[in-house]
Amino acid sequence: MTEEKFQKRIDREEKIEPKDWMPEGYRKHLIRQISQHAHSEIIGMQPEGNWISRAPSLRAKMILLAKVQDEAGHGLYLYSACETLGVSRQELVSQLHSGKAKYSSIFNYPTLSWADMGAIGWLVDGAAIVNQVSLQRTSFGPYSRGMVKICKEESFHQRQGYEIMAQMAQGTSEQKAMAQDALNRFWWPSIMMFGPNDSDSPRTGNAMKWKIKRKTNDELRQEFIDKTVNQAEIIGLTIPDKDLKWNDERQHYDFGEMDWDEFWSVVNGNGPCNKQRLNHHKKAHDDGQWVREAAKSYSQKKELIAN
Amino acid sequence: MSENRTVWEVFIQSKNGLAHKHVGNVHAEDKIMALENARELYTRRNEGSCIWVVKSKDIISSESEDGEAFFDPSNDKMYRHPTFYTMPEGSKYI
C-alpha cells in the first residue's frame, strides 16, 4: 500500500490497526507520543504518592490511593497500545531512563502542601482530560480505545481535586491562602502542558494530517482556559494572569504570555524535581528486579514439573 | 536474562449471559499471574463477572490487508439474508 492509499483511509476516518501498513513517520510519531503519554502517567504517580501518608483524613487517603492506582493502570493501557507498534516494554523503560523519551514537565514541580493535591487534580488532570477527550478520536485504533477507557476513569480525578480546592478556599484564611498559592504555582505549568504554540510546534502538521492529533496545542489550551476560569471564580480563587479577560469578539478568554524559557529549561532537565523523579523510577525498577526474576524462575520450575 | 515477559490478551464478560469482549493485554509469567494482573488492571470498577486470558502468540488473526478477498465469498450469497425472499402479499408473522 502506498502512502496515498493510507492517507485516503485516514481521510475516510478509518482506524488504523497494528498489522495495517503505515508510513514509518506515522509509526515513529505514535511511539514517541504514546510512550511520552505512558511515562507521564507513571511518573505522575510520584508527586501525589508523596502525600498518601500525610492525607488529612481516611477519606482523602483512600481517594488518593485509588487515584494513584488508576494512574498506574493508565500507564499500562498506554504501554500496551505502544507495544502493538513493535517496541518492547523494556525498550520503552530504558528510553525513559536514558532521557531519550520525555514525560510531561508538569511532574517536575514539587508538591509542597495538601492544596497541591487539589491543584493537580483540578488543573493537571483537567488539562489532561481536555487533551484525552480529543485523542479518543485519534486514528490509531489501540490508542483510541485506550483513551476511551482512560477518559471514563479520569473524571473522578478532576472532581476530587476541585472538591479539595473548593473546601480549602472556604476554610480558614490560612487554608484559603494555601489553595491560592497552589493555584499560583500550578496555573502556568498547567497551561503549558499543551505544549508550544502551534507556530513553534514543527510536528503538528503531520500529526494533524494523519489525525493522530485532532486539535492543535493552542486550540486545546484555549478550550481548557475557557472551561476553567469560571470554576476558579465560583470558589473565590484568582487565576494569576493579569491579562486574562473575556474577548466578546472571539468568544474566548484572552490570556497572557507564557514563559517558554522556563518551559524548555524544565523539559531539558533543569526543573526542580527532574533528577528526583527519574532517580526514584530507576530505583523502584532496580529494586523490583528480584521480583521479576523470582516470578520467571517460579514459572519455569512449574513448567518443568508439569512436563 | 531476558526481561520480556509473556503478553496475554484479556477478555472480560461484563455481565452474566453476555459474550466476553477483548479489553487489552497484560504482561505475566504464568496464567495465575496473568489472571490476577488482568483483574487489577481491567476490573477496578466492577467491569466484569468473568475474565479470560490467553497468550497473545496463540491468537491467529486474518490479515487485514487481504481482508476483502478473505471475506469476499460471503458477498455473493444474498440468499442467506431474509430480505432475499418474496413473500406472498398479505402474509403476516413471517
Image (tube, helix red, strand yellow):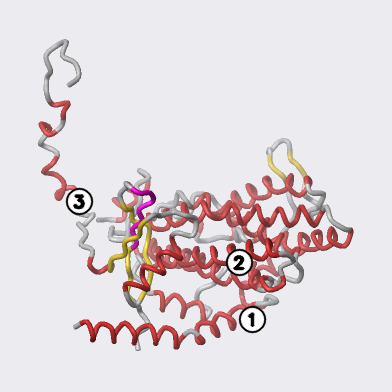
Label 3 sits on what residue type? Gly
Q: Is residue A294 left or right of residue A193?
A: left
* Boundaries of the magenta span: B10-16
Q: Quadrant of residue A289?
A: bottom left
Using a 10 Å C-alpha cutoff, classify the residue at mark 2 as few (fewer than 14 neighbours), some (14 to 19) or many (20 or more).
some
Q: Where is residue A20 shown, x and y percent of the image?
A: 28, 58
**Chain to which mark 3 belongs:** B
Q: Is residue A86 left or right of residue A95?
A: left
Q: Residue at x 43, y 63 (%)?
A: A30
Query: Who comes first in sequence, dot 2 or dot 1?
Result: 2
**Disc 2 and disc 1 on one polypeptide chain:** yes
Tell me the SS state at disc 2: helix
| Camera-side mark, 2 or 3 | 2
The answer for how far apart the CA atoms under marks 3 and 1 are is: 50 Å
Quarter of the image with the C terminus of chain A is bottom left
Label 2 sits on what residue type? Leu
Q: Where is residue A1 shown, x and y percent of the image?
A: 25, 56
Q: Which mark is residue B67?
A: 3
Q: Is residue A178 left or right of residue A154?
A: right
The residue labelled by disc 2 is: A65
